[in-house]
Amino acid sequence: SPPTPALHHSDSRRPRVVSARFLPPKRVMFAMSSTTVAGAVRTSRNTARVSRKTNTVSAMASSRVVSPARVFRARASSVMGTKVVASRATAARAANSRSFAVTVTAQDYDFDLVIIGAGVGGHGAALHAVECGMKVAVIEGGVIGGTCVNRGCVPSKALLAASGRVREMKDADHLKMLGIEVGDVRFDRQGVADHATNLASTIRANLTNSMTSLGVEILVGNATLTDNHTVRYGNKKVTAKNIIIATGSTPFVPPGIEIDGKTVFTSDDALKLETVPPWVAIIGSGYIGLEFSDIYTALGSDVTFIEAMPKIMPGFDAEIGKQAERILIGPRNIDYVTNVLATKVTPGIPGVKPVVIELSDFKTREVVDTMEVDACLVATGRAPYTEGLNLSSIGVETQRGFVPVNEKMQVTDSNGNVVEGVWCIGDANGKMMLAHAASAQGIAAVECMSGRDQVLNHQSVPAACFTHPEISFVGMTEEQARAKAEEEGFEVVVKKTSFKANSKALAEKEADGMAKLIYRPDTEEILGMWIIGLHAADLIHEASNAINQGTKVSALKFAVHAHPTLAEVVDEVFKQVETHA
């Protein structure tokens, strides 16, 4: 028989179990992004003159202020049988001139851009397209906001905020160090759940209003491509010069796992917080699993991670992973098993019958044990939501469900050729399954279709896990950097600092954590940065922006940070960088 995987636990009350089921993380994470909307600009009005020789239209007029929606794309009108469309860029130039030329286009599309999917990626692309002078429509078959706003990063942060307060107020030793004493701490489960629901509703309304106020048309229905310029939704169709696919993803459920939404569920149902089970098994120890372990243990549950890889949190930098185990797992009612798969999960009946999880050796696939728990959260990553798009109509074959794209986010067909006018962003293309990455890809795609090549550097996109304390990173792990260095023949330098030396962290009595900088000294290029500690998610952007801008790491050591702030943790690690004459 195969060797029995070890069970790691911090609570001796926990019965012995063996198992673990988890697919390697795809850098899954949810996070919200915001977009600034431009204000009104000045443009011209009145008479239009058409030149038969140049097929252009000139408008002469006095200037006036109009609303952004009207400036961004002038109303189409027929001049001598030809459609006239004024771009925002042209309108903006009119502010400094008494006349402007408007390009005449022979193609009569309904829109300049149609976006399939109104999640964070589609929203970011829509707003930027309007700013670039395009007439935009968004087709949504579900609800505005997509996964992030309704079933991901937004409601999960509400649950983390509320449960985090409960954890703080129940930590009598920590409060005593601050001179605070509290009595019995209680929480209302439904009230916590309502906070998540209400926050999602608020953000959903904000996203909707931000688009409609700028003239973006929201079309309701499930979208299907007819060709590379035509989309059907419901019993209607719409045409566009460009189409962006931004359909997002859904939770991935491995074979053999039966979902009932009550005792065996994905993050979609977990966010409803309909119950706080006494014992929860979490299949997968990536970002989603870690965040829910934080929520459940704060509210009183015991947690067991089931992990297929040899170590827990396999996608993390190894040193940061050890820190996370020490801070986030060891002191809490959490245990874990590794090197095993949850090959079969049978739902139970709350309070009557347990969930039964069959555990198999990761290598041999032989059943090694079973586990009985009150509930099971399946956090094994996410799968692209691209079925039903009729991609075959444009000659596109998905790869494990993902839509193939080039670096500009242009969709490519089965022969690797660009499909003119069709783009894909976000989880649907699989390049980086993060909400803010989807938004950045959408903005880059709009820039490219506007004739300004803009390629997103995915190495500069930060990610965060919103546990207490938080974990954030950008770029490579130390292991990845050293492997690349060995292959390409360059040196890697690592610098570290601790939160224990930071005045603000000490004032908060939350000095656990570290920051870690990984760079190559010959080019002074930042290869990666990892932070675990108080507000780590807010501290990573100095490094991510430096990577994006190509800033040399030595230049960052001369930046000034306010004192006393947590930002000085990052400052201290940058100041360790050696400069060479």
Image (cartoon, helix red, strand yellow):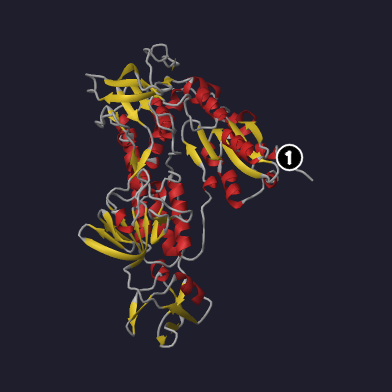
Q: Choose between 564 and 46: the one closer to the eye.
A: 46
Within 10 Å of disc 1 (Cα), the crowding (few <14, some 14-19, many 20+) is few
The quarter in which the N terminus is drawn is top left
Left or right: residue 386 versus residue 517 is left
Q: How many badges with numbers are in the image? A: 1
In x, y percent, where is residue 198? Answer: 33, 42
- Residue 241 vertical position relative to residue 565 in the rendered view, above or below: below
Indicate the quadrant where residue 52 lies.
Answer: bottom left
| Residue 318 position by quadrant | top right
Q: How far across and how far down the image is residue 284, in percent?
A: 40, 29
43 sits to left or right of 459: left
Residue 315, horizontal then vertical, whole percent: 49, 33
Q: Between residue 484 and residue 342, name the one nearer to us.
A: 484
Question: Which amino acid does the dot numbered 1 rest on?
Answer: Glu
Q: Is residue 247 above or below residue 215?
A: above
User: Who is closer to the viewer here, 370 or 553?
Assistant: 370
Can the viewer see residue 568? no
**Outermost residue toward the left in this view:** 235
As drawn, 405 above or below 265 = below
Can residue 297 be seen here? The reply is yes
Residue lying at the far right in this picture: please name it: 581
The residue lying at 41 percent from left, 23 percent from top is 363
The residue tagged with tag 1: helix, strand or loop? loop
User: What residue is shown with label 1?
Assistant: 578
Task: Give me the residue at 43% from left, 68% from top.
Answer: 133
Depth check, front residue: 9 or 297:
9
- List x then y, in percent, for residue 413: 38, 55
